[in-house]
Every structure is written in C-alpha cells, then in structure tokens.
Amino acid sequence: MIVVMKGGTTPEQVQEIAGRLEEMGYQVNPIFGVERTVVGAVGGSEHMKIDAIDQLRSYDYVEDVILITKPYKFVAKESRGAKSAIDIDGIKIGGDQVVMMAGPCTVESEEQLFSTAERVAKAGATILRGGAYKPSTSPYSFQGMGLEGLKLLKEAGKRYNLKVVTEVMHVRKVEEVAEYADILQIGTRNMQNYDLLREVGQSRVPAMLKRGMTAKLEEWLLAAEYIASGGNDRIILCERGIRTFEPYTRNTLDLSAVPALHSLTHLPVVVDPSQGTGRRDLVAAMSKAAVAVGADGLIIEVHPNPDHAIKDGAQSITIEAFEKLMPELQAIASAVGRSF
Amino acid sequence: MIVVMKGGTTPEQVQEIAGRLEEMGYQVNPIFGVERTVVGAVGGSEHMKIDAIDQLRSYDYVEDVILITKPYKFVAKESRGAKSAIDIDGIKIGGDQVVMMAGPCTVESEEQLFSTAERVAKAGATILRGGAYKPSTSPYSFQGMGLEGLKLLKEAGKRYNLKVVTEVMHVRKVEEVAEYADILQIGTRNMQNYDLLREVGQSRVPAMLKRGMTAKLEEWLLAAEYIASGGNDRIILCERGIRTFEPYTRNTLDLSAVPALHSLTHLPVVVDPSQGTGRRDLVAAMSKAAVAVGADGLIIEVHPNPDHAIKDGAQSITIEAFEKLMPELQAIASAVGRSF
Amino acid sequence: MIVVMKGGTTPEQVQEIAGRLEEMGYQVNPIFGVERTVVGAVGGSEHMKIDAIDQLRSYDYVEDVILITKPYKFVAKESRGAKSAIDIDGIKIGGDQVVMMAGPCTVESEEQLFSTAERVAKAGATILRGGAYKPSTSPYSFQGMGLEGLKLLKEAGKRYNLKVVTEVMHVRKVEEVAEYADILQIGTRNMQNYDLLREVGQSRVPAMLKRGMTAKLEEWLLAAEYIASGGNDRIILCERGIRTFEPYTRNTLDLSAVPALHSLTHLPVVVDPSQGTGRRDLVAAMSKAAVAVGADGLIIEVHPNPDHAIKDGAQSITIEAFEKLMPELQAIASAVGRSF
Amino acid sequence: MIVVMKGGTTPEQVQEIAGRLEEMGYQVNPIFGVERTVVGAVGGSEHMKIDAIDQLRSYDYVEDVILITKPYKFVAKESRGAKSAIDIDGIKIGGDQVVMMAGPCTVESEEQLFSTAERVAKAGATILRGGAYKPSTSPYSFQGMGLEGLKLLKEAGKRYNLKVVTEVMHVRKVEEVAEYADILQIGTRNMQNYDLLREVGQSRVPAMLKRGMTAKLEEWLLAAEYIASGGNDRIILCERGIRTFEPYTRNTLDLSAVPALHSLTHLPVVVDPSQGTGRRDLVAAMSKAAVAVGADGLIIEVHPNPDHAIKDGAQSITIEAFEKLMPELQAIASAVGRSF
C-alpha cells in the first residue's frame, strides 16, 4: 500500500500515518522527497486492506492511498495458478470446449420451451437457458412463470439432455431454484445484492454471476469473492454489456473483459451477446467475436417466434438463425484452437 | 405509443402491427409517408405498456417504438397534482422546511453515536443517520454492528429527539429494521433488488430510496413504483451521485435531478453530498447548492473524529464543520423561501 | 418526424405546430388521442431536419420531437446500397481482404521506423502507421518529429512497398501531410473539429476518421458527412474505444460498432485495438475478435523495443508479437470467409 | 512518482527501472516488500513527467505508475496561491462579484440581438453572449452569421455597455474574432483542439475554455495549460455539463467541478446551465445552485422568442424569465457573501 501525503505535510503527520500502518500490521517505509512524502507499506493482512484504505484516506493531509495488491483472494488467478474448469455433471466450463447455453429469454409455455430446447440441443447447445423468475424494471411487466417455469425447465433439460441455467432473484428461493437448476444465475441488477450472494455462496449448486451494468472488473471480482468466501467456489462470470452513453445498443458489450479476466482470475468467463447488444441483428457477429476473444462459453436468447416473445424479442434470434450460427462459431473456435 | 416502421415496409406488415396493437386495446392510426410509415396508438392500459414496447420491437420491420406516456402511475406527479409531504411523526419531508439528516456513516460505538447525535440535534438536524447493516464492496470489510447498532440508533434518537434513518439490506430483516427505524433506507446497490423493494412496499414504515449509481430517472421512479404499488406510498427519493468517467469525485452528484424529479413526481427529494462527492472538502459547497436547487432535505455524514472512522471517513465532516455549515445553509434556505 | 405534444395541449397549439411543419415543407398528420396528441410529419428536405427538431423542441407544449429518418445522406448505406471499397493505389479497404496497418505510435528515428516497417511488411501488413504530428494531453509532452517524420514515413513506405497513414491535426498543414501520406488520419480529439473536417473534405487524399472518445454512432457519421459533403468521399471509419467508467482499460473498445456501422453506412470500418485497450497484453485477443466481428482492417501499434518507446509503449506490441499474431488472424479471417 | 512493479520482479528489473528514473533526473528509493516492490522517485523536471509515465508503463514488469504531483504548472493553484481575477476592461471575473453573461445562443438578426442585449443589460448582465460562428453536429445545420454576426455583437455591446463573449472555432479566424470580442470562447468540441488552443494562447484577448463533454478535470486543466504556456494567462473555465448515460438532460451539469477547481487552480470558473441541462425548465434552479456552490459567473441563453430560435430554443429562457431570475440569484449571492 502506498500512502501519498499532501504537499507541506509535517514529519509528525508522517509519523502518525506510519503509526497507524504499523498498528495494522504493515512494515512501513517513508520516502521523504523535496516536494512531497510518500509512505510505502508492505505486508499486512489481506482481510483488512479495503477498510485500511478507507481509514487512511480520511486524514486531511493524505492525498491518496493506493492499493498495490488485489483485494480478492479466492478468485484471484494466483490462488490456483491455472484456469479453473467448472464441471457441471460432465460438461466442463473453462476447459478446451466452448460451451453453448441457449434458450428463450423467458419460459412462456411447454410448447415454446420444448420446441426450442429440442432444436438447440440438436444444433450443439449443451445448456438450456430460460427465465422462470424475471427481474423487470417495471412492476407492471410480466414477472415470469415461477415454480411452474422451473419445472418445465427441468423436464425439458432431462428430455433433451441439457443442463439448465436460470436466474434466482429472491434470497428465500435459492433452495427452490437450486432444486431445479444446474446453474444459479445472478442477474446484473443483483450483482451487489450481498444478501443474495451470501445465500448462493452456501448453495452446492454452481453460480453464474453476471456483471453489474456499471461494475468495474474489480467490483465484479469482489462480488464473486462474496460467493467464494461462503464456500461455493464453482463460479462462472458472465460479461453482458455495460452502460455507456451510446444509445444504439442496449448495452456496450465489453469483450476486452474476457482476456482481462483471464489474467486476473482463474474463473471461466462466458459472454451474453443478446443482453450485451439488445439487437438481434448484432448477435451473430458478436458471438463470433466472443469466441475469437477467448470466451469459455456463450449464452444466447433463442425463440421459436421472436416477434411474439413476451420479453426481449428484439434481442432473440430465431431457431433457424441459431442453427445457421453454430457451424460458423465452430469454424472460429477451431481457428483459436478450441471446439464446441 | 408510436411504432416507427423501417423503410420499405409493406402494407401487410403495417396491418400486422396495427392488429397487434388493437389486440392490446389501443386505437390505431397509421401515417403512410413517402419514405416511411409510422403507426400511432393511443389508449391501452397503463399496465401493459412496457411489455408491449418490448414485443413490438421484436418485429424485424419495426425500427423503433416510442412510449409517449409515463410508465409509472402512483409516483407520477399527475396522480396527486401537488407535491407530497411525508410526515414522520411531526417532521414533514417535502414541506416548506428543509430537513437535515446527519450522523455517522457507520454506528461504531455508543460513545461515537451519542456524542454525534447530541451535537447534530443541537445544531438543527432532526433526523439521525447511521449504518447498522453496511453494504460493502468487499466481503472482508466491516459489515456493521447489526442489531446492536439498531438498538443504539433507537436509543440515541429517543434521547436527543431525533427520528432515525438506517439502511435495510436483507429481505428477511425488513421487520427487524422497521422496529428500530423511522425511515428504511434502500441503498444504491439495491435500487433494483425487486425482492427487497416489494418487501419494503409492505412495510408501514416510510422508505428512502437512493438512486442506483447508474439509474436513469425513469428507472428510479419505476423502482419507487414497486414500493408504492405494494401499498407503501411514503417514499423519499435520495440523489447520491451517479457513476461517470470523472475520477476526481467518487460519484458525480446530479443536482439537476432535483428539479427534474419535482416535475415528474410528487415524491420529496433529498440529496446526499457525502456519498455524492466522496470528498469532505466538497460537502459544504454541494450542500449549499442542494438547498438552492430545491432539495427537500440533506443527508450528511458527520463523525466526531473522521480520521479514525471505520468507514468513509474521507467523506465525513467533523461535528464542528457541521455546526458551522448549518447557519450558512439557513441563509440559502431563506433566499429560496424555505427554512430549516 | 414525430412531434409529441404535452398532455393538455389545445387544438390551437397543435395547429401552430402543424403550421410550422407545413412552412418547413412537411406533410402533416396529427393524431388526437385521449391523453395526448402526436403530430406526424413526412417529406421535408433532408437538409433542414436537424434544425427543425431543435426549433420544434423549443415550444413549451412540445414534449419531444423524434426524427425517423437518418440525418446524414452521403455516408448512409442507402446512398450506395452496397459497401464501398476505398482503393488506395491498389489496396482495397472494405473489400474481401482484411487490411493490416501497423507501425510505431510515434516516428522516433529512421532506425526505429525502418526496422519496424521492413518486418511488418514482411509479416503481411500493407499500410504503415506512424505519428509525425502528435496530439498530447499535456503541452509538455513530445509533440512529434513533424515534417521530418513525414519524410521518413514516405521513404519507408516507398522502400518497403507500404502505403502510409498518419495523423493530421492542423488545418494549415493538411496539404503538407497530404503530400507525404496516402491516408489522412483524423484523431479522436478532432472528430468534431469541423474546421479540420471541412479542410480534409477538400483534399484528394482519403481520410481515416477515428471515433470521438465520447461520440455516438450518429455523431460519428455526421462528422464523416462533413468530409463527404465537401467532396472527399473516400472515408474510412476507425473504432478506437470509447470512454467509460472502467479504469482497467484505457478505453472500452466497442466492437459492436463494427456490425452496427456496416448496417448504417457503406463506409469501411477498421479497428484500433492498441488505443482501444491501452494494454499490450490485450491487443492479440482483441485483434482476433475484431477480425471475427467483420472489421475491414486493423491498425496496430508495433515497436521494436516498446519499453523504450517515447509514447504509448504500454499499448505497443513487439515486432515478434506482431509476426506471431498475423497467422492467427489469418486463421480467423478464413473462418469468416476473408483473407489478409 | 511511484512505480509499482509486478509480483515476482527480479532485482535486476528493479535496477533497470531505477536506472531509467535516474537518467530522467529523479532521486530513486526502492521499497522491497514480501509480495511486491515499489520504486519511489522524487524530483525530476515538471516538463517530462507525463512522457515518463508513459515510458515506464511500457515495461512488462511494471504494474502501474502513479504521478504524485500535478502535471500542470501555470494554471495550478500553487503557482499563485490565491484565486486570479480576470479583468475585462473593468469587469472582474473571479472577484467578489458574480458575473452574468447572457444573450442568445445564436446571433440571428440585429432586432433579435439588440432587443435581448438591452434588456439583459438592464436586468444586470454585464457580458453579452451570442454565437456568430456555430459548431454544429450536422453539416446541414445553420453555421452562424459569421463576420456579420461579430459586427452586430460588437455594436450591441457598445450601445448597451456590455462586454462580448463569442466562440472561435477556426484557427485562421482567431484574429478576426479577437477584433470584435472581449472574450474568446473555446467550445466543448474543441477543448482538445491543440492547434486552436495554441493560437488562442498567442492572443492578447482573454479566453473562456469550456469543458470537453467527456473531459476529466485534469485533462481540462492541461488544455488550459496549453493556452497559458503560450503566454495568454487570462483564462476562464466554464463548466457546461458532461456526457453520461442519463437521457433526461442533454448533459449532466457537474457542479462539484466548481469547488474542486477552486482548490486545484487559481483560474475563475463560470457555469453554463443552458448547455448543461438542455432544458429551459431547469435553468433557473441550476443557476441558483451554481451561485450557491461558488461559481464566479453564469452564462445563460436568453431569447426574445425561444419558440422561434434558430438553434437551442429548448434551452433558452425568455427575457422575462431572465428578469425574474436576477433578483433571485442576487438573494443567493448575498447568502454566500457575494453580489452581482
């Protein structure tokens, strides 16, 4: 940790800071310069660093405090050395294969879900996505089929040999969703819902943590650390676009997050080009880019009849479009030494 | 609602859209232009509009769908005509008086809380703030004193004749917090935690809803609508800064939100210059600006010894600074025809 | 154009707006609804639309004005139907081949430039990049070698059979730069320097217009329209990252802009992964993604010894890294039906 | 300057960095920690710091480089100690008085300009604003009356005893504009047009530098440093809103920039609530807030008939609204110890 003192700081003030740092368990090394003094601190416990920064910043004569080690531990690349592959009953996310998750934004009916599941499975998807509990900006929007939707998902998964990923929004429903799903998705609006993160941290079911629409990489990894520190270390990160000033797309899909995360964490990273663009006509191109950039998987919204989807039809592609896309993605995957 | 068709749309396609709109209960009026056709739709139920937009956007030949009425109802200005004043046991938020909420970021000890409460009350604050359950970006940060903190808050409030506002983060603790607090604060990270919003919507205790750090005004009002539609219409909005590219301040305090909200909603609006800037040296100036712009209240972090605060000391002002600030704010309040 | 009137508008007010629109040459069609009236306007001259919006928005009883046709003409996809390929003396940008532009951020010396040029040419680059006039955030930074740098670029280009792209910053130096360069680059800070855009619009040399770091796609295309309307229609767009809240990367490279632009404009689009990330370790992955997403070219900063580069060494890759990258990109290009 | 080395750096690598720093004239002090090494460097010339950061960041084994002194000099608060007041022929910007600049967005006619000038002068404005050369996002928008507009401005100024501020966009017209204006405005799109900044830096006429719509405070001050280092130290900064995700306002007016700048620089700061919000109905409230927060002046768009303004009518207030606003602002000014 580096504490930068303001210009004109007295030796007593530097001493005060050095004292605080020593109390916190750091070894302290002040550098007195002509214009300015900085205090370097090494050692100290992982667990206190974030609070320490906060406390040192409080001093009027401290200009800035800079953390030089990462504030997360379990999810840091260093903790494993290599990339982790999450094994979902034989399907490995984070291994050599790129994993395809596909299905409707929202479970609407048996007919809609099963027809989609059958064909995406045939086309090469191994995981079925579908919303049973839906977060909606408006209280008047459709909130999902709930438990009935979960049951349909599980049944469709069984019939077509697909694993199931679906969102969990309610702390009190984590167990219920875990009964029917193979992966618990935490949505963008709940990325810093710490209550939910801790609850999922105690589940035995793997979690897929979507990036908050305004989350920095570090905040995202700290949210994952909440889950991991609770005991559930089977976490998949999902880049789904960030909020920017550009109105053409619903979000700006930040593909540079994929290689960046691969150097910061051992967790696998998948990409959601549907939410990430909000536009059906951009999904194919961004899917190809995501495979090329090194994503461990994709999650794509597919609907048998997007024009009549209850939600997010504008970003859903048709089943036919999905079938056409899969071999194109396989070509890219081969080009980067992976397969589907 | 206006549905803008893409160039080259056929009359059949326009007919298809018109048919969907009529099914939804709209009266339809297409305008055929030389280059392009637009379909105007009036009427229709408030409750379906957001989903309808989503569904119409799904059509490949639809360029855009534009909502021309607001998607919220209970919190809309029109639903009351005039501004609402929320009465907290005699203290009116949204009336002629500007209400001052002050206290430490985090409840740390009886000594710290009571000494602060006593003096902010004497200086003119009527509501005590203080965190008992603290949301923290890192799982390793201090998470608050919990129930013990709530008890201290209630006791301090009683002793110094202050109402209490404190954050509630856990769906399963809404009742517990409501027992000790006069206002339930929902923090920026939970603005779209719909589970929590619904739970607070069923409480008899007023809510203070902070703006999500990346929330548009409309999304914020829809979050308030979640609470209101649950039956709890005593809602205070709190502007606390939005996330931008500027690193100098922790957030960018968007003061234009105050007059904007006053024209969109009847709910009172308070301003948090501590979170909104993250810098102690900017709190006084931004507090003055907030009163001048028409805020119904301020919420300020005050600490007897900010250099030793557990959290957010950098944005906390001293008790002395608070005492000095109050008369300055009163002068501004007078200048805009209000008082403290 | 759609003019949305506020609630409670009188028929006289609607008439006033309709009159203004008719004066402007529009055919007018008002839709009177129960809650609200909208006025549809079709026809009207391309050239006045932006000002018309501005003027109609001024009315107190107008809620919003929505443009339903694009405000640009020469650069719009519709103006050509197909994609344009810009022919730079035999090298086609926007055709089947993906074009590689490579070279140092800044021309530092003959030795540095020529050694780089020789090897990037051998590895498959066809265009040499290099800054002679450098825009710098600080007046105390190195501002480039100027004319001497231009001369070196031209000579290196001639010797290694590379075309040359370099930035022009000064209105009074457009002719000078045009004498030495095959493509005039307009940098991100000058995207809305209309004086410069008009000057380049009168040049016979093709232009490469980088996206403003905060420019919406529409604003970018309008900037291109400035150049095109001056007579120079050989314009290449270059996505180079936008400014967001994420501090990990210098900019957020918006790859979705590539397919989006391909549907909005006939102009070719290249991608700059060096500026777009600011991090050498992300350049290879983002280059692959850019080819996969459909970019017509890449522009990459390559330096024989990045650790000793005068500028932007952190985002420059070594010549060896570039040589290793080229065949990897070729594999992706093949997978999407293109070549280098 | 602090150079943070990556984990696992060898002593030789630290030595290499230390050597580079010493070459640059710094005194070097490495701190070897258990996990990581940091190298502190003090001294060194102001003028090289920005480039030095760039060069040190290039090393693969350097994690980050942190500048601990400000990269600007002439405009830094320290260079004067106290705030500067710019004297425009007897009107002081940056002194005790808050200065009001008012007038139409665009000069449209003698009638429009003179009627506005007369009444804003009577109401207390001392500086007349008005655009003669207008930057427009579209090449098809009105570009201003040019020289004729400048002449009208000068005449109106003389007749009503107002100084004149107007925008200069063209490097080759700085002299022309300087002949007619008392303050040369540099617009938001040109904040990093270094060619123009240098040209204005050689003028004897004071400059008003608007904040780039995406400029950090530091970048803005470095742009001012371009002007100051050219010899023109009479610079006024103008906060005019930044670009964020919020669509309700045209820009987000960042009032915290005012006190922040007052602690970073000696230059006076004025606020533009018209551009800053883009909405007439927010101008009065934000003007009051700007005075309360400590602005040295305001620049407001006033039009005799905003509904018929050629440009930006939506953000222009009427003359009557301006007359009503002035005494309200005076009341706030008194409350903060200033006057108009």
Image (cartoon, coloured by chain):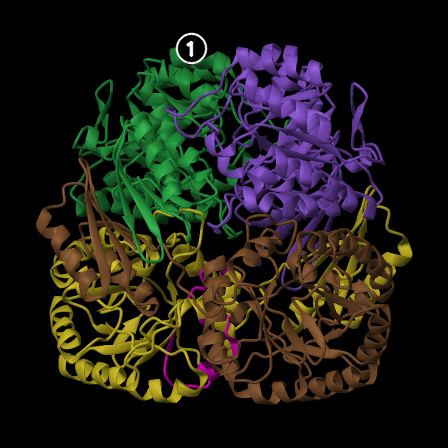
Chain colours: A green, B purple, C yellow, D brown
Q: Nearer the viewer, residue C98 or C141?
A: C141
Quarter of the image where one finds residue D160: bottom right
Quadrant containing the C terminus of chain A in the rendered view: top left
**Disc 1: host chain:** A
Specify whether B268 is left or right of C316: right
What number of labels is visible? 1
Is residue A165 one of those drawn in magenta?
A: no
- Residue C217 percent location from the top left of the image: 49, 60
Q: In this view, does C292 lie above or below B322?
A: below
How many neighbours does mark 1 have within 10 angstroms: few (below 14), some (14-19), or many (20 or more)? some
Image x and y of residue C168, in percent: 38, 79
**Residue B306, percent across and down?**
51, 33
Mark 1: which amino acid?
Glu
Instruction: Work out which residue is located at the far left of the displayed protein and give it.
Output: D12
Residue at 18% over, 62% down: D20
Q: Pointer 1: what residue? A: A175
Q: Give C162 or C188, whichever is nearer the viewer.
A: C188
> What span is colored magenta in the figure?
C190-216
When the figure is inspected, residue A239 is found, relative to residue D100, above or below; the finding is: above
Describe residue B203's horizontal placement relative to residue C154 as left or right.
right
Give percent across and percent down for residue C110: 16, 80
What is the secondary structure assignment of the residue under circle 1?
Answer: helix
Horizontally, residue C135 falls left or right of residue C195, namely left
**Quarter of the image containing the N terminus of chain A?**
top left
